[in-house]
């Protein structure tokens, strides 16, 4: 039998479906054949943690849940840095709870970047589409200030490296999604695409900017290997319409792979035994494949 990849799996927010989908994923023969898992999280959940970061009674506060989720992420990074595991797969967290628990990060991507002192990029990937965000969890009103030439350059550089090293694409074809309707339509609907995005794309050696209403369709038809989106919702809407439940969140730019499912904590169905593990299974199998290439 082929050697299994060593991965750390965090349970995420213990109030959500994270423990349930981790338990289901670990019972799946595809996962059992591919990885040797180290589960990290609070004790007292429905899947035992190999490395417990505290106890959970099931009735703790959001702050308790966020603190335990943050501790699990920190422990997973320590394991990856030490070489004890080859990659990290994270179950969903609640961002408000994470802040209440003492971790002032808007999400996994930003927390991992801080812990590693690295520039990272968030990619959502499926067999139909790959989308990378130039900006992540910020208010829409702040997007025009954040979409700079350097932000596009960083996203393009990290995406190229990730596609080459982790997805085995020797010559990545990357497109830049426009910020404004019709890519600004010659300045009629905004000048950012002409004055910032177009020169940034040329300097980075990527195509675009192309209007959002066509660029993702072109990528799904095989013209591009990935699309860089200028802000969160335009990119997330495209990938989730195309592949929700089967896409994988990948943090590019780290020295080890980190993946997660394409959904949140789903607290409205937690504890009912009905949560699907398919996106988490896809995240585990992708992380294992990437780690095996390292």
Image (tube, rainbow, N blue to C red):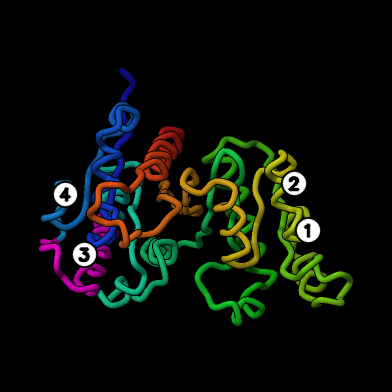
Which residue, given by chain and number where applicable, does mark 2 sit on?
218
Which residue, given by chain and number where applicable, does mark 3 sit on?
68
Marks 2 and 1 close (CB-CB < 8 Å): yes
Position above or below: 64 against 145: above
Alpha carbon of mark 3 to alpha carbon of mark 2: how far?
42 Å
Give the x, y percent position of residue 290: 45, 38
Residue 180 in magenta stretch: no
Alpha carbon of mark 2 to alpha carbon of mark 1: how far?
10 Å
In this orientation, does residue 82 appear?
no
Q: Earlier in the sequence, mark 2 or mark 1?
A: 1
Q: Nearer the viewer, residue 259 or 254?
A: 259
Give the x, y percent position of residue 166: 52, 40
| Circle 1 residues within 10 Å: few <14, some 14–19, many ≥20 | many
Which residue, given by chain and number where applicable, does mark 4 sit on?
46
Q: Could you say which disc has been placed on residue 210 in the image?
A: 1
Q: Residue at coordinates 23% horizontally, 43% vertically from top-left?
A: 38
Residue range (magenta): 54-75
| Circle 3 residues within 10 Å: few <14, some 14–19, many ≥20 | many
Alpha carbon of mark 4 to alpha carbon of mark 3: how far?
15 Å
């Amino acid at each position: 039998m082929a050697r299994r990849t060593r991965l750390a799996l965090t349970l995420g927010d213990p109030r959500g479906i994270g423990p349930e989908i981790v338990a289901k994923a670990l019972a799946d023969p595809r996962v059992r054949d591919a990885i040797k898992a180290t589960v990290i999280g609070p004790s007292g959940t429905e899947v035992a943690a190999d490395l417990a970061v505290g106890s959970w009674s099931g009735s703790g506060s959001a702050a308790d849940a966020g603190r335990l989720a943050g501790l699990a992420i920190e422990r997973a990074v320590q394991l990856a840095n030490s070489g004890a595991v080859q990659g990290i797969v994270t179950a969903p967290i609640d961002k408000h709870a994470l802040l209440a628990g003492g971790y002032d990060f808007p999400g996994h991507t930003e927390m991992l970047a801080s812990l590693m002192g690295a520039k990272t990029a968030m990619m959502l990937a499926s067999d139909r589409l790959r989308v990378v965000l130039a900006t992540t969890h910020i208010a829409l009103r702040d997007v025009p200030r954040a979409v700079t030439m350097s932000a596009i350059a960083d996203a393009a550089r990290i995406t190229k490296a990730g596609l080459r090293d982790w997805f085995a694409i020797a010559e990545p074809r990357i497109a830049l999604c426009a910020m404004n309707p019709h890519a600004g339509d010659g300045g009629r609907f905004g000048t950012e695409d002409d004055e910032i995005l177009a020169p940034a794309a040329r300097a980075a050696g990527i195509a675009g900017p192309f209007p959002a209403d066509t660029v993702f369709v072109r990528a799904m038809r095989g013209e591009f290997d990935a699309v860089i989106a200028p802000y969160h919702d335009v990119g997330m809407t495209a990938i989730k319409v195309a592949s929700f439940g089967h896409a994988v969140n990948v943090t590019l730019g780290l020295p080890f792979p980190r993946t997660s499912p394409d959904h949140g904590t789903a607290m409205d169905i937690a504890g009912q035994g009905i949560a699907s593990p398919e996106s988490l299974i896809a995240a585990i199998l992708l992380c294992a494949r990437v780690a095996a290439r390292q």
